[in-house]
Image (spheres, rainbow, N blue to C red):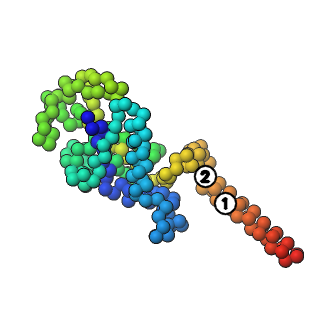
Amino acid sequence: GGGIAWAMQPDFCDNLIRRFPEQTSVFYLGWLSWVSCADIVDAVQRGMQTWSDNSKVVSFTDLTGTAACSAPSGSVLDDPCPWEMLIKTTDGSEHEELAAYVIPYRASHFFNASGGEYYGTWYPAWQHVPVRSPAGVSTTGADPFRRSELYFNTHICWYLDATFCYEFQRWANSGVDVQTLVQCTLLAIFGAAAARLLWVCSRAAGI
């Protein structure tokens, strides 16, 4: 029908934006913002749009900000917002080795083998309801996913430019002290620049 309905927790941006190095106290000047919530939301939407553009049967519908989803409770079973995917943050206490992960919930999580009522609508037993796979194949007897939670861990740093940070993350995962390496590189560049400046000044002064 209308694709995968998704919503974003109201505090998603506030929790995640602090994990962008561009927003740290070193670079953030108050009046000048290098990364905004609009940039983060736009990155999420572009990711979904890319998926939709490359699939004939997968699409996404943003419910964030609609009347029913202005403040989703996040409760999988009884959130009145009809989301099928809820985007939220977590502190990394679980699955700390991952940047993001998904927890899916199948139809059997909501209804028993005899079916059940969900917000005034009666749903038949899930095993008798035809479902369609992303490949377009329709079948019955499957236990389809009803809802999913997409978590972004906030114990790590985030960048909008994934190409830039990928190599640094790969080095860090292989045991390289990336922070020390970057600091030493910057110190060497600063030292070379200072030496060059002293040489130019000495030449100008005739020393």
Relative to 46, does residue 54 appear above or below in the rendering? above
Q: Are marks 1 and 2 in contact (CB under 8 Å)?
A: no
Residue underneath mark 1:
186
- Between tags 1 and 2, which lies in front? 1
Task: Give the residue at x 62% y 48%.
Answer: 176
The one of 110 and 48 positioned closer to us in this rendering:
48
**Residue highlighted by disc 2:** 178
Q: Which quadrant of the rendered structure holds the N terminus?
A: top left
Which label's residue is closer to the chain start, 1 or 2?
Answer: 2
The spot of residue 43 in percent (x, y) is 43, 49
Left or right: 166 as drawn, with respect to 155: right
Q: Position of residue 171 (x, y in %)?
A: 60, 46
Residue 92 in view of the camera? no
| Horizontal side of residue 154 vs 139, given as left or right | right
Looking at the rendered structure, the kind of residue marked 2 is Val
Q: CA distance from mark 1 to mark 2?
A: 12 Å
Quadrant in which residue 53 is drawn = top left
